Amino acid sequence: MTTSNRKLDHINICLNEDVESSYTGLEDVMFIHNSLPEVSYDDVSLEVEFLGKKLKAPFLIASMTGGHPDTYEINKNLAIAVENTEIGMGVGSQRAGIEDESVANTFSVVREHAPSAFIYANIGLPQIIEKGVEYAEKAVEMIDADAIAIHLNFLQEIVQPEGDTNAAGGYAAIREVASELKVPVIVKETGAGISREVAFSMREAGVKAIDVGGKGGTSWSGVEVYRINDGVKREVAKSFWDWGIPTAFSVVDCHDVLPVIATGGIRSGIDAAKAIALGAKIASSALPFLRPAMMGHEEVERKIEFFVEGMRKALFLTGCSHVYDLHKTHIFVHGLLKEWISFREFDLFEFVRRRFHDF
């Protein structure tokens, strides 16, 4: 199957099948309601700067699609919406557009309709290992990107019938791109999370931000289950459906190593606010925007408003006047997330110990 047709496969599966994993870790976080917030709701600010670009809110539409003619309108609608709402977005893996110039416009349409928005390019680490910096440069040039995400999706690759399973030399490849490319490099997972150890290695490689892409949202092993014909391989993929580090765990692990984008099961503004309270700089989501993007940019804008207004109200109800005040607000952590914090022995995280209350 061509890369282009595989992209369409993925869209149809995400639209029509159950593809989500369980448990993000955000379920174990509770805000402590402030019944006397002492702020005016009208003064609550979500505006931030990220990798040199101003955002109206710390929220991105995560990398989703592109690479098949049918994805042109999806990316167009996403782009118009992020331009109008002054947030940002990533495109799906640009491998298809680099391999086949006839579908490059399904990616470049984003910059055409979002000339001012924060847009990041996206290419897989296996392609970087094989093709080098030039491949990343082509992805950036295709959409005049403000940054590039190198995605780590080896869980998906190892179960996918057409998967690229060579990870050897990955660190060196990322380091080379980070040192030679003119735009910041983001390393992003795609549903299995990033650990503290990997975050430190990425910082050493010159990476500027991490998208943790944690467990709890779309399971790409789960998506591939619907594409596998071999019975044994399908059952193996199914057994990895819930594999990975939950989103909240990854945010806690990585937040003081590099700026963190929290992706993976972010399904509301409250989820986004929780992720930021745990230390993320940005929250993002993909799957909730797929169906709206097939309907029109107005529907995408309504979904963005759902997330942004939820964040704003969470700020007000915790007495925060700016979104990054969430980094200082008290939160209650219990369950597996509390166990993770203890297990990881975050002696470097004294402020975490002060903020995480156990009643």
Image (cartoon, rainbow, N blue to C red):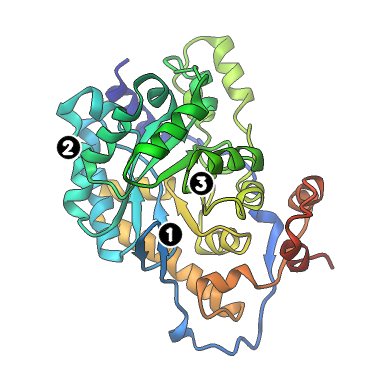
Spot occupied by residue 40 in the image (x, y as percentages of width and height): 50, 88
Three-letter amino acid code of the residue under disc 1: Phe
Spot occupied by residue 297 in the image (x, y as percentages of width and height): 25, 56
Can you identify the residue that label 2 sits on? 105
Residue 223 lies, with reference to residue 348, above or below; the image says: above
Three-letter amino acid code of the residue under disc 3: Ile
Q: Is residue 156 visible?
A: no
Spot occupied by residue 26 in the image (x, y as percentages of width and height): 64, 54
| Left or right side of 39 for 355 | right
Three-letter amino acid code of the residue under disc 2: Asn
**Element at badge 1?**
strand
Label 1 neighbour load within 10 Å: few <14, some 14-19, many 20+: many
Residue 315 lies, with reference to residue 114, above or below; the image says: below
Tell me the residue at 24%/51% (across/down). Answer: 77
Residue 195 position by quadrant: top right
Can you identify the residue that label 1 sits on? 59
Can you identify the residue that label 3 sits on? 210
Mark 2 and mark 1: span between their CA atoms?
25 Å
Tell me the residue at 66%/85% (across/down). Answer: 35
Specify the farthest residue to the right.
359
